Image: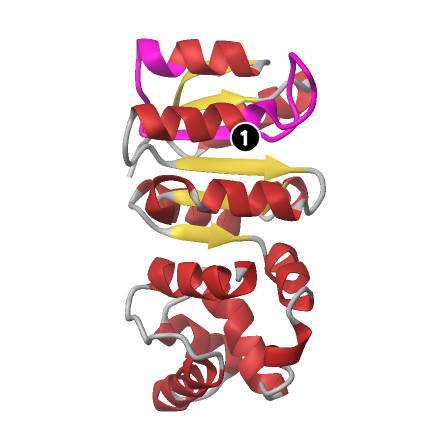
Amino acid sequence: MPLRLIVAEDAVLLREGLIGLLQRVGHQVIASVGDADALIEAVRADPPDLIVTDVRMPPTLSDDGLRAAVQLREEIPGLPVLVLSQYVERSYALGLLDSGGGAGVGYLLKERVGAVTDFMAAIERIATGGTVVDPEVIQQLVRLRKDPLEHLSPREREVLGLIAQGRTNGAIAAQLFVSEAAVNKHIGNIFTKLDLPVATEGHRRVLAVLAFLRA
């Protein structure tokens, strides 16, 4: 599905690389900018199907890109956003996932761009309202709440990590070489042990897990 995108990245080489990659798979980059103010202006002038933005950008080189994305999601409800970051920064991930009810958002490390197939799948998932969280992000969030998760088995932890990536039950079963019924059982156990309501949609399950980790 061809998408109209805006790319915001202050590093010129990475920005041009992202643009070339997106165009090669058929997407249209309608604007590319190098700072948060220009991102806001570009989106207001011509709202895209999805924004791809860095976290740290001018003018302050702190979390300008993220704050711009959250602001734009408040102005344009449902605007899909994929945030790329050099490092795992918990507050940035949670701040993004708190915006707009958590639908149509993603937080990935920049190194994931090199896995082109997975990266493009993440973009399409976010554009259609899904949620994508980098595996390293969820691992660090999990470490912050050790006690409740000590009750999970190693397999349940593995399934939890895949849930957090937005995988469907069928996709989890295929990756772990188990039946879908076995995955359903693991997921039931996870939500029971973490005292979370069972939800069927991937992005809602991610949000439930993250809500627990924020508590």
Q: Is residue 23 visible?
A: no
**Residue 50 part of the magenta-drawn span:** yes
**In the image shown, does 215 or 126 lie closer to the viewer?**
215
| Residue at 54% in and 47% down | 94
The image position of residue 200, as x and y in percent, is 28, 70
Location of residue 122 in the rendering, given as x and y in whole percent from the top left corner: 45, 48
Mark yes or no: residue 56 visible. yes
Answer whether residue 7 is magenta in the image: no
User: In the rendered image, which quarter is residue 192 located in?
Assistant: bottom left
- Give whichever of 125, 153 is nearer the camera: 153
Residue in front for this viewpoint, 207 or 46? 207
Relative to 44, is 113 on the left or the right?
A: right
Q: How is the image coloured?
A: secondary structure
User: Can you say whether 20 is above or below 170 in the image?
Assistant: above
Disc count in the image?
1
Where residue 41 sits in the image (x, y, percent)?
42, 9
Where does the N terminus fall, quadrant-wise?
Answer: top left
Looking at the image, which is closer to me, 5 or 25? 5
At x 32% / y 76%, what residue is drawn? 198
Give the answer, above or below, for where 185 lies relative to 204. Answer: below
* Residue shown at the point (59%, 37%) measured from the top left: 84
Which amino acid type corresponds to the residue marked 1 in the rendered image?
A: Leu
Q: Residue at x 49, y 60 (%)?
A: 210
- Residue 145 is situated, as x and y percent measured from the top left of the image, at 64, 69
User: In the displayed structure, would residue 194 be above or below residue 73?
Assistant: below
Q: Magenta part of the protein: which range?
A: 43-66
Residue beneath disc 1: 66
Give neighbour class at mark 1: few <14, some 14-19, many 20+ (Cα, 10 Å).
many
Helix, strand or loop at disc 1? helix
